[in-house]
Image (cartoon, grey):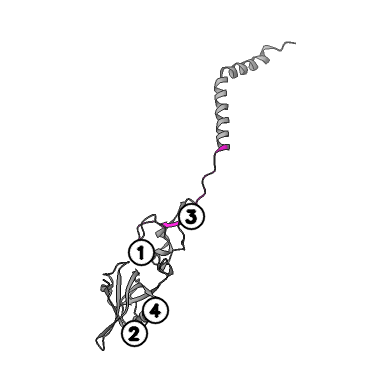
Amino acid sequence: MRLPDRLTRPARAVRRGVLARRRLLAAVLTAVAVAAGLQATAEPPPATVAVTVAARDLPVGTVVTSQDVVRAAWAPGSAPTGLPDPVGRVLAAPVRRGEPVTDVRLVGPGLTDGRPDLTAVPVRLPDAGMADLLEVGDEIDLLAADPRSGGAAVVATSVPVLALPVDVEPAVGGNGLTGRLVVVGAATAEVTAVADAATRSFLTYAWSR
């Protein structure tokens, strides 16, 4: 039995519309299939490790704050070792923006990494202006001066300057004088003499030849 035109007319219109747009529909379906295939075969993003780096150039002696560092993504195997939390620590050397803040850049035991013959020893020079002449890496001879007798004696020779921390507030040393803190690398046999001189005498220095 033949259906009335009023019932078959909408079906014929839909069929004509589909046929007229079959190429467009085929292209869309093909694009969807290709996109789905690419997504299914795409490799996952490479693994990374988080490394603490300087957010800006930081000078030696900086007390590191949370605003001074950021976390950066590094490829596994490329990240350096010795990455403690640097916040609240003092920089023993300048750090450039984007450079990892490792233990060898911080005042602490890491300063003598690679030098098992040295011990990091903090001393306070009574003349801050004299200490300002020093740079990290300088080698100096430490001398203990006695203002009462007028004499001076060498207590350590060719000790490297490891760090020049910035004092937040002037501090008083064991000899009762304010001054500037300097961290030096002393040989094991010299540590006791250096520590004793730092508390009993006026420390001064001369550049090693």
Q: Label 4 is placed on what type of residue?
A: Ala
Circle 2 is placed at which residue position?
Answer: 200
Left-right relation of 6 to 47: right
Mark 3 nearby-residue class (10 Å; few <14, some 14–19, many ≥20): few
Residue at the top extreme of this rendering: 2
User: Foreground residue, 34 or 26?
Assistant: 34
Circle 3 is placed at which residue position?
Answer: 50
Residue 26 x %, y %: 57, 23
Residue appearing at x 34%, y 62% in the figure:
94
Which residues make up the magenta segment?
A: 41-59
Q: Label 3 is placed on what type of residue?
A: Ala
* Alpha carbon separation for disc pair 1 and 4: 26 Å
Eyeballing the image, is 41 above or below 68? above
Looking at the image, tell me whether mark 1 or mark 3 is earlier in sequence order. 3
* Alpha carbon separation for disc pair 1 and 3: 22 Å
Q: Nearer the viewer, mark 1 or mark 4?
A: 4
Looking at the image, tell me whether mark 4 or mark 2 is earlier in sequence order. 4
Residue 85 x %, y %: 46, 63
Q: Determine the secondary structure under disc 3.
A: strand
Q: Which mark is residue 189?
A: 4
Residue appearing at x 29%, y 73% in the figure:
140
* Alpha carbon separation for disc pair 4 and 3: 41 Å
Looking at the image, tell me whether mark 4 or mark 3 is earlier in sequence order. 3
Is residue 147 found inside the magenta-colored segment of the image? no
Q: Nearer the viewer, mark 4 or mark 2?
A: 4
Q: Label 2 is placed on what type of residue?
A: Arg
Q: Quadrant of residue 143?
A: bottom left
Looking at the image, tell me whether mark 2 or mark 3 is earlier in sequence order. 3
Looking at the image, tell me whether mark 1 or mark 2 is earlier in sequence order. 1
Q: Which mark is residue 93?
A: 1
User: Foreground residue, 109 or 45?
Assistant: 109
Residue 177 x %, y %: 31, 81
